[in-house]
Amino acid sequence: MKTHFIFDLDDTLTNSYEFNQQMFVETFLPHISDIDEQYVRDVHFRSRGKSMHLQFEEIVSKLNLKLDPEQLVKENEELHIKNVDRIGSFESVEELLKMFKANNKLVSLCTNRQYGSLRRILDNNNLTHYFENIISCLDEGYEKPDPKCLLDIVNKYDLPKDNYLYFGDSKTDHDFAKNAGIDFVIIDQYLNQKKFFKVILQAFF
């Protein structure tokens, strides 16, 4: 029986893909106003789950830009914090978390999103209090798919690994959970009309 559920954030719990992509584009605009926006969007689309600095590095290298990818990551996070109230959770996310807690399940969050915007998103959507652990792998220095942050949660509790289940949305999340040796569910909210958790609740609870 699963007793501890661990979630990714973006595109798993929150409807953030279009917002994230727009912020990705807008990070470049103060530096290069005529940048090929479609190319930037394409990189973002096929890099879902990849760390931000790798995405910025790819564009900087491909377009031979004289920009620091690490600085772009910082500027991107600043844009996110400034505009983060535009990110909402998917339908029935809070109901699902509430159901887990009512049934004495543990719930945690483990994401590559930085703490600054992460905490604002959770607070804005009334989700913070549902989580036993909230971890930014990027800020902790061990980005997914490095399993360190996930294993830190697992090792915190006296539970066998088969008690854990990780929810994510990308190949990176798949590798993350697999590297940690725990079970996982990889979902595409957008293929499921942004109603995956609503359908699950209606079907089984």
Image: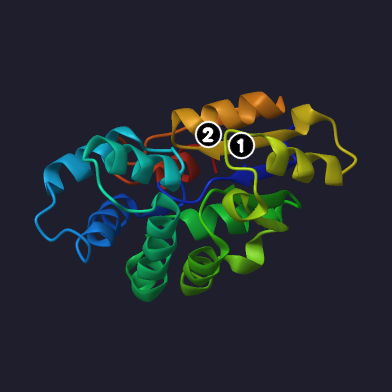
10 Å crowding of disc 2: few (<14), some (14-19), many (20+)? many
Which residue in the protein does label 1 denote? 166
**In-front residue for pair 98/162:** 162
| Figure check: 62 above or below 69 | above
Cα gap from disc 2 to disc 1, whole angstroms:
8 Å
Determine the secondary structure under disc 1.
strand
| Figure check: 204 above or below 102 | above
One can see residue 182 in this view: no
Q: Position of residue 119 (x, y in %)?
A: 55, 68
Question: In front of the other: label 2 or label 1?
Answer: 2
- The amino acid type, in three-letter code, at marker 1 is Tyr
One can see residue 24 in this view: yes
Task: Determine whether label 2 and label 1 are within 8 Å by CB.
Answer: yes
**In-front residue for pair 174/183:** 174
- Quarter of the image for residue 92 reads bottom left
How many numbered markers are drawn? Answer: 2
- Residue at the location (44% across, 38% down)? 50
Q: Position of residue 176 (x, y in %)?
A: 59, 31
**Which image quarter holds the N terminus?**
top right
The earlier-in-sequence mark between 2 and 1 is: 1
Which residue in the protein does label 2 denote? 173
- Residue at the location (44% across, 46% down)? 53
In the image, taking residue 125 as reference, residue 60 lies left or right, namely left
- The amino acid type, in three-letter code, at marker 2 is Asp
Outermost residue, right direction? 158
**In-front residue for pair 158/134:** 134
Q: How is the image coloured?
A: rainbow
